[in-house]
């Protein structure tokens, strides 16, 4: 029989209510809408031995957990407003030195697991090293970008390996306010040497994604959140008896309290001991946090939900712009109530070993940029299609759409750039060209055109239009290109792709307003490093 361990000192119970009773109805009425599932991170890691790749741990989990819980905190109504007042705040406005990407309808939050040893509780998890004067200071082993779609019905958590070698832009030191010149360094050094704004600027410069807000969480905060959930159940293929993490667990299922969970996410000597396996284990743990934090059992239990919200509020630090705007927090929560654990995904940036240093990693390109483009193109709020009596004559797939891409701007190479983006999403680009306006200036808006005589031209054009941002309105009638050129796709279509032999050839004329092609097909390296929260319930690691 599986040994299931209960959470010590956590057996909080609420008097049961009969379905349909006055008490049950009152509890249901008072309960806030389902909390937005926000997170996924990795945990802070232990500082004792192990080497670079072996030490990425606790911060990741802390962060993810926190943010998921923050999402829960966002669901409060008036009864929870006092809890928001307990959130630690940090003013960051005015500290950015570099140009920032534009804001979109999506919500992008940077989650940072701070492994500071400051404070009595955090000091228990590491002692200052006399050889390292900053050992008691603030560092991070976990940096996560949480992206919530404009509809707030999906969340993707992207983790950045802390050993990633990247270009860090000039930053202002958080404490001294001194300007630090740009440099190439490990990504987590942006946080340890510059602070949260430097970290946000670095991620923005590397990804082109606007970071709207940030959330920090430390060791003690992680424990409080797990305890407020009455523990998280895990499943192990093998038992654990590890002195370094002070953790002893049997094979099978165990219910971990905050202290045990902290040891679990710091655990290094388990399985094959690889960093990749540890990351996967942490992601599964966070998936369970998401599922429990958004369960109906929690949402109808007002005392327990209130306790969770207070624990989260007391465990995190966020930017003052978000923390001070209680109404915005509530609005975000209300719009996010449709999110379920099935809409939360955890992804690790595609990476490989740094050719100049085997103890460091670099991001795999162009795969990483394609992941960033997918985030950047997720900016539209879904709208119901207007009702019409004219149904599509045919069902068209991208592989059946033939298109000639013309550059209608004064930017050289734009047609090939857009053609490559379309090819990676499965469209058949049959040629390139230029289209010059009468005044020689850039065409103001992007156009999609199809042959007037093509019976299904509109259907094919609509499929193409649905992938272009901003979305153009297809027009019947093609234009004469100023010049034309051949095109060879960098991504050959699979042999099983539907034929486009009889499909009309469309024209995409790229205008000055063109932003991007939506990214729906991602490289295998991204898909292989992504897990869905709702699919991790019965996974044993």
Image (cartoon, rainbow, N blue to C red):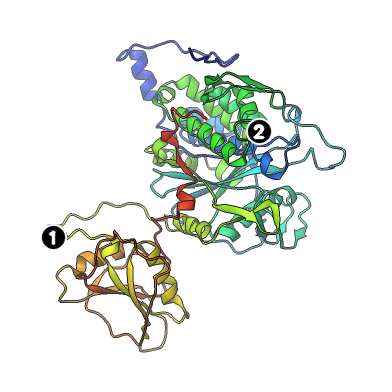
104 sits left or right of 168 in the view: left
In the image, residue 285 sits, relative to residue 483, either above or below, namely: above
Question: How far across and down, in percent of the image, does residue 258 sit?
Answer: 61, 24
Q: How many marks?
A: 2
Question: How far across and down, in percent of the image, does residue 200 sit?
Answer: 62, 53
Question: How far across and down, in percent of the image, does residue 165 sit?
Answer: 67, 56
Tell me if I can see residue 94 in this picture.
Answer: no
Mark drawn on residue 441: none
Gap in Å between the C-alphas at discs 1 and 2? 61 Å
The answer to which of 94 and 445 lies nearer the viewer is 445
Mark drawn on residue 268: 2
In the image, residue 301 sits, relative to residue 86, either above or below, namely: above
The answer to which of 25 and 535 lies nearer the viewer is 535
Disc 1 packing (10 Å; few <14; some 14–19; many ≥20): few
Q: Residue at x 48, y 51 (%)?
A: 526
Which residue is situated farthest in the right direction here? 130
SS at badge 1: loop
Q: Residue at x 29, y 62 (%)?
A: 398
Q: Quadrant of residue 420?
A: bottom left
Q: Residue at x 52, y 15 (%)?
A: 4
Question: How far across and down, in percent of the image, does residue 181 sit?
Answer: 74, 63
Q: Quadrant of residue 448?
A: bottom left
* First reached walking from the N terminus: tag 1 or tag 2: 2
16 sits left or right of 357 in the view: left
SS at badge 2: loop
Which residue is situated farthest in the left direction here? 389
Q: Which residue is mark 1?
A: 390
116 sits left or right of 111 in the view: right
Disc 2 packing (10 Å; few <14; some 14–19; many ≥20): many
The answer to which of 325 and 519 lies nearer the viewer is 519
């Amino acid at each position: 029989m599986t040994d299931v361990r209960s959470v010590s000192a956590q057996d909080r119970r609420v008097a049961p209510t009969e379905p349909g009773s006055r008490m049950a109805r009152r509890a249901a009425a008072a309960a806030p809408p389902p909390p937005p599932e926000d997170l996924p991170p990795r945990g802070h890691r232990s500082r004792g031995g192990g080497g670079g790749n072996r030490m990425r741990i606790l911060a990741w989990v802390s962060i993810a957990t926190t943010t998921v819980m923050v999402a829960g905190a966002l669901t409060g109504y008036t009864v929870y407003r006092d809890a928001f007042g307990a959130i630690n705040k940090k003013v960051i406005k005015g500290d950015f030195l570099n140009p920032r990407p534009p804001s979109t309808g999506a919500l992008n939050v940077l989650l940072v697991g701070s492994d500071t040893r400051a404070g009595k509780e955090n000091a228990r998890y590491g002692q200052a090293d006399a050889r390292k004067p900053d050992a008691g200071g603030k560092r991070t082993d976990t940096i996560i970008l949480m992206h919530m779609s404009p509809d707030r019905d999906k969340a993707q958590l992207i983790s950045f390996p802390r050993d990633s070698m990247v270009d860090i832009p000039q930053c202002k030191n958080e404490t001294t306010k001194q300007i630090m010149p740009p440099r190439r360094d490990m990504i987590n050094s942006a946080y340890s040497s510059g602070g949260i704004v430097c970290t946000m600027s670095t991620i923005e410069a590397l990804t082109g994604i606007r970071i709207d807000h940030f959330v920090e969480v430390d060791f003690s905060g992680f424990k409080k959140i797990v305890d407020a959930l009455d523990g998280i159940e895990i499943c192990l293929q093998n038992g654990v008896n590890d002195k370094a993490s002070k953790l002893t667990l049997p094979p099978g299922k165990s219910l971990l309290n905050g202290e045990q969970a902290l040891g679990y996410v710091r655990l290094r000597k388990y399985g094959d001991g690889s960093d990749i396996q540890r990351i996967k284990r942490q992601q599964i743990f966070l998936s369970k946090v998401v599922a429990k934090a958004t369960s109906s059992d929690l949402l109808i239990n007002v005392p327990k939900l209130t306790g969770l919200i207070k624990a989260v509020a007391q465990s995190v630090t966020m930017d003052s712009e978000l923390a001070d705007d209680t109404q915005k927090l509530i609005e975000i929560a209300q719009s996010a109530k449709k999110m379920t654990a099935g809409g939360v995904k955890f992804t690790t940036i595609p990476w490989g070993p740094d050719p100049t240093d085997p103890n460091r990693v670099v991001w795999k390109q162009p795969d990483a940029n394609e992941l960033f483009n997918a985030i950047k193109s997720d900016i539209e709020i879904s709208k119901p299609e207007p009702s019409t009596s004219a149904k599509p004559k045919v069902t068209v797939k991208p592989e059946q759409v033939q298109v000639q891409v013309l550059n209608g701007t004064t930017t050289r190479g734009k047609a090939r750039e857009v053609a490559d983006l379309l090819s990676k999403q499965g469209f058949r680009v049959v040629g390139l060209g230029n289209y010059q306006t009468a005044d020689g200036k850039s065409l103001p808006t992007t156009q999609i055109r199809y042959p007037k005589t093509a019976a299904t031209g509109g259907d094919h054009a609509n499929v193409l239009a649905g992938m272009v941002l901003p979305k153009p309105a297809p027009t019947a009638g093609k234009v004469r290109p100023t010049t034309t050129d051949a095109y060879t796709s960098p991504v050959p279509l699979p042999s099983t792709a539907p034929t486009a032999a009889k499909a009309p050839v469309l024209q995409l004329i790229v205008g000055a307003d063109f932003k991007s092609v939506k990214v729906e097909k991602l490289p295998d390296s991204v898909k292989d490093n992504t897990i869905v929260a709702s699919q991790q319930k019965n996974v044993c690691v």
